[in-house]
Each structure stands twice: as structure tokens, then as C-alpha cells.
Amino acid sequence: MTRILATLPILIALMVGGFFLWGLNPDRDPNAIPSVLISQQVPEFDLAPVAGVNIPGLARADLTGNPGPVVVNVFASWCVPCRAEHAVLTRMVERNSVRLMGINYKDKPEDALAWLDELGNPYERIGSDLNGRAGIEWGISGVPETFIVSGAGTVLYRYVGPVVGPEAEAEFSTALAEARAAKAPRT
Amino acid sequence: MIPEIGQFALALALMIAVVQSILPILGAAHGNLLWMRSARASSVAQFVFIGIAFLALMRSFIVSDFTVVNVVENSHSLKPMLYKVAGTWGSHEGSLLLWVLILATFGAGVALLGSNIPDALKARTLSVQAWISTGFLSFLILTSNPFERVFPPPLDGNDLNPLLQDVGLAMHPPLLYFGYVGFSIVFSFAVAALIEGRVDAAWARWVRPWTLAAWMSLTAGIALGSWWAYYELGWGGWWFWDPVENVSFMPWLLGTALLHSAIVTEKRDAFKSWTILLAILTFSLSLLGTFIVRSGLLTSVHAFAVDPERGLYILGLLGVSIGGSLGLYAWRAPAMEGGGLFAPISREAGLLVNNLLLGAATGTVLFGTLYPLFMEAVVGTKISVGPPFFNAAFIPMMLPLVVVMGFGPFLSWKRADLKGIFQRLRFVAVLAGLSGLAVWYLTEGGPVLAYLSVAIAVWLLLATLREWTTRIRLFEVPFGDAMRRARNMPRSSHGMTLAHAGLAVAMLGFIGSSAWKSEEIVFVQPGAEIAIAGFDVRFDGVERVQGPNYVADRGTLTVTRDEEPVTILFPERRFYPVAQSSTTESAIRSTLAGDLYASLAEPASEDTAASGAWTLRILYEPLVNFIWIGAAMLVLGGGLSLSDRRLRVGVPRRAITPAAQATPAE
Amino acid sequence: MIRKTLFATLILFILPFAVAAVEPDEILDDPVLEARARDISQDLRCVVCQNENIDSSNAGVARDLRLLVRERLIAGDTNQQALDFIQARYGDYVLLKPPFQPSTYALWLAPGVFLLFGIGVCILVLSRARTRRPNEALSDSEESAVAELLAQENRSDP
């Protein structure tokens, strides 16, 4: 009995040590928060277009019943990394025929308009989320965030932060390719 | 040149540590007195060389030597001198240097002051201490060189994080580390005892002063840290159950348990293997703290030098030291049973309950802190374990502990007369209950737990005082006689009384400031008045002032009570242009009854700033200063106990008994 | 590593409206509802911060969540419903008080288990001490002599 009790501390310490070793894995980001939306239906939201931009707004209905996956990007003109990401998204739309939807998060319409005029508009639809409420429905923690939604309206993937740089772009493209491959068996 | 001297001194210290790791312990095994005694010189030399390195780094900070990367990253030529000095330990590298310096300080302390400790035990202890030194010195030199140069040197530095430019926080790390790392020597003593296979009353007495010194510093360090959070972060809170706070709190909890269990080992020759285990675990938790703070394993508000590779190195050190010592424990401890017998109602049993509750509480805090990591590894989901969990789990364990603390000092060794104690404490219990009711009658809207806790805190305070008066027979014999008795009693017993009373006082502070805090958050134009907790606070506007390395918006608040002027408060928001960040300097009017606490929030926009309207946060925190007064009493109580002459010149010698001789000496 | 730096830079930019924690314009007129809102806010973790609750956080998202909590309360939600509403969007991660569910049974039961385990060990120690306890109390010197003998015996027989 005494021997068992005396051995207990080292066993517990070794177990905890194992967890630490796992936790130090450099690929693990302790700040990353998993989205609850993954493999859920897109949340309920309905956003008006950005005033002055002549493309329609965005609502849940626009994300269900599409023939293939679409990309939903949350952006704002005040967000500096979004500027870099804009180029990447534009390239994806032009080269890979990605369907890109935008949620303009807490942005003054005139600022958003100027931003799009300057950089070009790769978005098919943009909803103006003035009070950030749709952002909460999507569970976003900051801008930019990018989601891949299946044709049927299931959220398949979420990327936090700008999809910029070879590493991020490769990760995103892989997710997109998977989404496209998986679209076939639609029930 | 000077930084190179520092670096060279570190390398020398490492070499000495390596020698000290081997020679004395070999000497102890072979009975070579010369080898054993080499530990004395090498411990002191280690201390001197690490001290030289530390001073070299400090000098680089003082003269703002921007050829040293560490100075560039953490200092600025315009920074006030105090913070230049404090910058020495403001970074990962510098604080680690402080860490090894304290490690060496305790080693040298035992080498120089522990003249009554037998050569073999001392040699083994100092060798074990050198193992730890070797590990951390090599970590410092290989991965975190504080003396790295940069060429060409930049014109000026990046400044120390302004949040950390504060007197309280400048002193917080040295005290905290002194506590944390001080437990290393207790750990070394424990490992040496395991190697010798012998723990007895004398061992417990040799270890006690070091445990006390470490515990006092840790108490002071934690209290200072929470005080800093209270006035600097501008939220008015003093404890947030953040992982980094928890990792400093766990060694404190277990160290407290160790102090108490070591008493049983010293007085009754019991709880031996338990005391050894506590000594090992207390320092292990300190190491764990160092690991968690520096590896970025858990998310915390106190982000600090996050680097997974360094984390891996420390984890290796942890594995060797904790794994090794606990392995040794598993092997050797079962042979250490035995000791004095005692009844279920006795001082031993009381201290057992103390250890049980402190141990379970430590386990709970540890488990709660690491649970998100466990969940992420096993299930793959992320959860948060925050203050609501810790409060719900921790408080119910502490309340019974405090109740038992009231009885504890009355219990006699071996077998106590509970009925007699009840009789003596009847009056105290009634008073405590009444005070709970009185507070309930006088206040409104506190949780039931708060009233219960008030009663329990009052119980502890009065029971502690009652025990003290019983001991010196105050009111029974003439006053002069009682005072003479008090003078003749060992100081450690007064220390115990003071520390226990200190906990009761601190507890009143915890309860008062969390259950009856009032808060007003207002957006006001100059001239507006805010009423809070009986005070009237008039906002007189904000002006811009220039500090040494910052600019500040300083608000003026005139506080009156019943038309009588009370004070004028100047809360500030400082902006540090070099570090590009701002801090909140709250203004506090402190009284024993409570703090009136005001802070300025950032202006919502440029427009509102121009209009002169600001957001003010005004808090009234009743009794909050009791927390720090109580903490000071805990530290002073420890100090009184430490100054006890039995610990200084008591020369505890090991009785040569047949049992002792029968033990193989390795 | 790159991602981490990016994330850090990102944090710098996503907070254009960074303001103080709880702002006057958020505060509800009804003091009871406001107090409930403050309570709930203290149990919700700010998703962009390093371990802070939304009540004390300056982040924009934290402010949105505070407003949302207040809206839910005005709409007649109970505290639990308001928490559930946020949890449904941000997951268990935002709850500083983890829900009692299979994955957290271990966490919530741990304090009790630790205590029971400790009590078990204590009882073991005490009962051993009791069985070894002689009927009549011995004097101190006798006691230590006995202890010594017992210790010797324990050493010699394993």
C-alpha cells in the first residue's frame, strides 16, 4: 500500500509531463479558437448592401442552394491586413473561379466604397454589417476571417486572419479543393 | 567589455556548478571530508560569479549600453533610473539570470550559515542544489544569453513595457523569485535526505528556516503582485485566477502545507515521507510555474517571453529534476514510515487536516489550470476554466480550513481535550456568529456566503487572540507576569499567532472588497458630480501633463462627503511614445474602511476628447487594504518565527541512536 | 510561427474602436438588469484577448457581446439563456465557468475526488496510529522509546 502511494506522484508527474510535451508542438497555436460553425448550417443573417456599391447584399438564403462551394470573407476598410488579403482574394476569383461573398464588418459605407473603388471589387455580394451583429452570428473574433461554405449551406472551413503568404494560401486552397471534391454527394 | 566579463563569469559559474554537482556528493559516499567540504567554497564562488554577471547586466542597463540586445529591447535612455535598474530583470533573459542568482544565494546561504548541519547531509544538499544550477545556467548560456551584442548599436532602446514601469512591479519579481527559487534548497535537502535514507526531527529543524524564508518572500511577492494589479490595471480587481497567477499561488499553498507538516516532523518525528514529498512538490510547482510562464503553453494576460523551443528545454530540466526526485521518492520513501503515535483529536490530526485541505486545494488549482490543455489534447476541443470555477471549488475548501485553524493552536500533541477547547471557545463562536449577523443587518445585498465567511474570519481572528491570551495567561495572572510570560515564550509561537491573525484580516479584506464593492461608470462633462458610497465626486476636467518618458492626461476629481472636503484625486492616462502604448494610473484614496478608486478611460474618439467629456470609472472597495495588511502580518509572522533563537543558535544535533546507526550510510 | 506573428499584428489592427471596458452608453437604466448583465459578462471570455472576461476587456468584440447580452436580457432571457445564446455562436470556449457535461465531469468532480482521496489516506494513517496505540498513555520518554523500538522492528522485517 505504502509503495503504491509512494509511486503515485511520479506516475502523475509523468502523465502531466506527457501533456506538456504534446502542448509544446510548434504547430499548435494556443490562441486559436475552434469555430462552432464547422459542419453546421450557415447562421441566420440578412444584410443590406453597402450603400453606394451596386451589388446586392448578403443573407443566409444566398448561401444555400448554390451549385458549388462559396467563400465568405469578412473584411473592413480600416483593417490593414485586409488590404493585403484583398489581392489574394481577387487572384483566386480571377484564376480559380472562386465565388466570393463579402461581409463588410463595422465599416462606414463611404469608407468601404472608397476602398473598393481603389482596390477593385472581387465580391459577388457584400452585406453591410454596421453593428457587427452578423459577425457575432458567425462567431468571428476579428477581421479578416474567411469561411468556405458548401453549396448546400454547410460551413466547411474557417480561416482566422488574412489568407496571405504561401503557407496560408496553400492551406486555404487545399480546404477549397476538398470542398469542391466533396460537393458531389448532395442529399 | 563589461558584458563580456559578465558572460565569462556565467561560464565560470557553470563550470563550478558542474564540479559541485559531483565532488561533494562523491565525498559523502566515500567519506572524504575534503571533497565534502569543497561544497562550501564552490557554493560561495558560484554565488560570487553569478553576482558579477548580474551586476554586469545591471550596469549595462544603468549606463544604457545599447550594444547589448537585451538593453535595447527592454530599456530606453530617458527611462527613470529605478526602472533602468529594474529592467535588469524585466526580460526573459534577465529574469532568468536573477533566477540562478537566487538559486546560488540559497546555496551559499546554506554553505555559510548551516554550520550545524552534518557534513554529509550538507555536501549532498549542496550537490543537489548544484544540479539545479547546472541545468539552469546551461539553459541561460545556451538559449537565453543576456549579454548578446548587437552591431551597429541603435541610437536608443525600445523601452520597457510601460505597464511594468512601476515601483510595485519593479520589486515584485525579485520577491516572487526569492520565494519560488528559495524552495529549491528545501528540495535539495529533501533529495539529500532521500539519498541518505534518513529524515528526523533534526533534519526538519535544519530545513525550517529556509522554508520560512522562501515562504515569506513568496507571500510578499504574491501580495505585491496583486496590489500592483489592483492599482495599475485599472479594473480594481486583485486576483483573477489567471494561469500565471495560479502557478505562483500553488507553491504558496503547498509551501504553507510544508511549513506545517515540517512542524510535526520536527516535534513528533511523524509525517516524514509526507514532508519530504511536500518539499519536492513545492519546488516542482515552482519549476512548473517557470515553465508555464516561459513556454506560452497556456494563454494568459501576463504574456512573457513566449518561445516553444525554450519551453522544450525547460521541460527537459523539469523532467530530469521532478522525475528524478519523485522516482527516488517512490524508491526510498516507503522505508521512512513510523514516528510518533497520535489520537484522532490531537495537534497532529489538526495539522493533518490542514495538509489535507491545502493539498486538495493545490490539486484543484493545478487541475483547473491544466484542464484546458488536457481537454485540447484528449478531446480536441478548447474550453476555458476561469474564476467562476476556481471560486466555486476553492472557497468551500478554504472555509473549513479556517474553521479548523481556530481550533488548531489549542490542540495539544498526541491527544487533545476537545471538550475543554469547545468550552474555552464558546464565547468566541458566539461572537463570530453575532458579527456575521450584525454585518447582515448593517449591509444589504451581499451573498449568503459572504456573511458566513465574515463569521468564519472573525472566528479565526478571535480564536487566535484567545489562544494567545490563554498562552500568556492574560487576565489570569497580573498583567506584568503575563507580559513576562509573553517575552519568554519562543518567538515562533508569537509568529504563528500573528500569521494566523493576518490570514483572518486578509480574509476580511477579500470578502469586503468582493461582496460589497460599488462601482459607477459614467461619461461626464467637467463639473458633473457622481455620488458613490456616501462620497460626492466632482469631475473638474482633464489636463495634459508631461512626464519623464510619457505624456499624460490627468483628471482632477474633488471628493467631498456631506459637504466636507475629503480629498482631490488625480487619475491619469499615460502614453509612452517610445513603447507606443498607454497605461492607466488610477488614483486611490486609501483608508482602513475602504478605497475610493478612480480611473480614467480612453476617450471614445477625438471629438469627445475635444469636448472635455471623459469616461470615469469610480469604485468603492470596502476593507480592501485589509488584504495587504493581512499579507504583511503573514510575512511579519514568518519573520518573527524565523528570528526564533532556536532556529539560529539552537544547534539541533542529531541524537546518535541505534536506529540511526543501523541505517546504511549509502 | 509565421502565423503567430501575423496573428499578433492582426490584433493590433482589429481594434480600431478600442475603448474602455464597460462604457456608460452601454449601461441599462434598470439597475437589476444591469447587475445581471455585469454578472453574465464576468462569466464570458473575450475571444480576442489573452484570458480576460468581456466585462473588463476593451476589445470591440467584447463590447459587442456586452451589448448583445443586455439586448437578450431586455428581450426577457434568463441569465442562462443569454449565456446559451453566446455559447451557441462561440462555443464552450467563451464560458469561463465550464458547463457541467461529460467532457468536464472530471474537472467538476476533481475537487471532491481529491478531498475524498485525501480523507481516505488520512483515515488510513489515523487507524494505523490507533491500532498501534497502547491502552494507557505513556510518558514522553516511554513513548519515544517505543517509537524507536517500533522503528527498528519495521526496518528489520521487510
Image (cartoon, coloured by chain):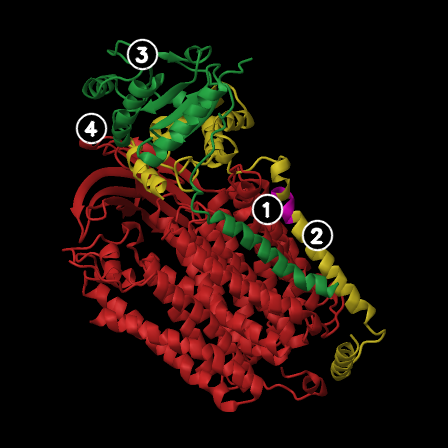
Which dot, 1 or 3, sits closer to the camera?
Answer: 3
In the rendered structure, the colour chosen for chain C is yellow
The answer to whether residue B31 is visible is yes
Q: Which residues are magenta?
A: C107-111
Using residue B410 as the reference point, say whether residue A112 is left or right of it: left
Q: Position of residue B383 (x, y in %)?
A: 52, 38
The Cα atoms of the two marked residues, 4 and 2, are separated by 61 Å
Q: Which chain is red?
A: B
Q: The chain drawn green is chain what?
A: A
Give the residue type that dot 3 points to: Pro
What element does badge 3 sit on? loop
- Residue C110 colored in magenta in the image: yes
- Which of A89/B272 is in front? A89
Residue that carries the numbered disc 1 in the rendered image: B393
Vertical placement of residue B612 versus B90, above or below: above
Image quadrant where residue A29 sits:
top left
Residue at left 47%, top 72%?
A: B131
